[in-house]
Amino acid sequence: MTEIRRGTLPEQTFYEQVGGEETFRRLVHRFYAGVAGDPELRAMYPEEDLGPAEERLRLFLIQYWGGPTTYGERRGHPRLRMRHMPFTVDRAAHDAWLRHMRAAVDELDLPPEQEQTLWNYLTYAAASMVNTPD
Ligand code: HEM
């Protein structure tokens, strides 16, 4: 007899829908390649090695979208706006950050609806991180 399980399966998280860790690894790796090649934006990042910053952003996004909560275990509550206060996030920084993120999102080649969900969040979050007026 065929078991009818439709409707009983747990809903997939967005993290799972878009391809799990591999997708976020690609996204954030591509983003930081953009940062590395952008002298103005690069100058904002205090560490010589961008690897640890790349890992923090990757783990944060994975957690945000319903994946493993490693970010919280290592860093505690994100309090992202507060964590950005030491940096001058003005409109130029905001635009540069989003420009590199846009290129990274494009390379994922996600289905349009998923891409829109991800991009809406990133633009909203970037706007909320601005802490320095022009
Ligand atoms: C709007 C432009 C933005 C600029 C210029 C910017 C810049 C920075 C800089 C310089 C750091 C420190 C690097 C490090 O040591 O980790 C940082 C950390 C971080 N940023 Fe941003 N950021 C921006 C927007 C965002 C957005 C929109 C998000 C989330 C969607 C985000 C998530 C993070 C995370 C998770 C960290 C590490 C926090 C931690 O210490 O645990 N940032 N950012």
Image: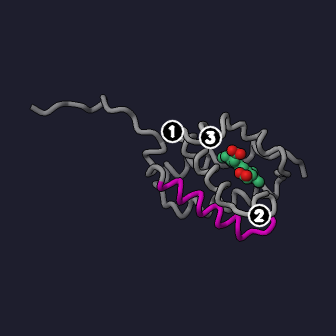
Are discs 2 and 3 less than 8 Å apart at CB? no
Residue 66's disc is: 1
State the residue in front, 115 or 24.
24
The extreme right residue here reads 134
The mark closer to the camera, 2 or 3, is 3
Q: Could you tell me which residue is drawn at 76 percent across and 40 percent down?
A: 81
* Residue shown at the point (50%, 40%) measured from the top left: 68
Direction top: furthest residue: 8
Position of the N terminus, as image quadrant, is: top left
Q: CA distance from mark 2 to mark 3?
A: 24 Å
Q: Which mark is residue 42?
A: 2
Q: Work out whether mark 1 precedes mark 2 in sequence or the reverse, and give the earlier one.
A: 2
Q: Tell me the tag on residue 56.
A: none
Residue 117: percent from the left, percent from the top?
A: 55, 46
Q: CA distance from mark 1 to mark 2?
A: 29 Å
Q: Give residue 41's quadrant in the image.
A: bottom right
Label 3 element class:
helix
* Disc 2 CB within 8 Å of nearest ligand 1 atom: no
Tell me residue 57's x, y (percent).
Answer: 63, 50
Kindly identify which residue carries mark 3.
74
What kind of residue is marked 2? Arg
Picture coordinates of residue 69, whole percent (x, y): 54, 38
Magenta: main secondary structure equals helix
> Is the residue marked by circle 1 packed among few (<14), some (14-19), or many (20+) residues within 10 Å?
some
Amino acid type for the residue under numbered disc 1: Gly
At label 3, which amino acid type do we have? Arg
Relative to 87, say whether 105 is above or below: below
Give the residues in magenta.
22-42
For image coordinates 36% across by 32% down, the residue present is: 10
Color theme of the render: one colour
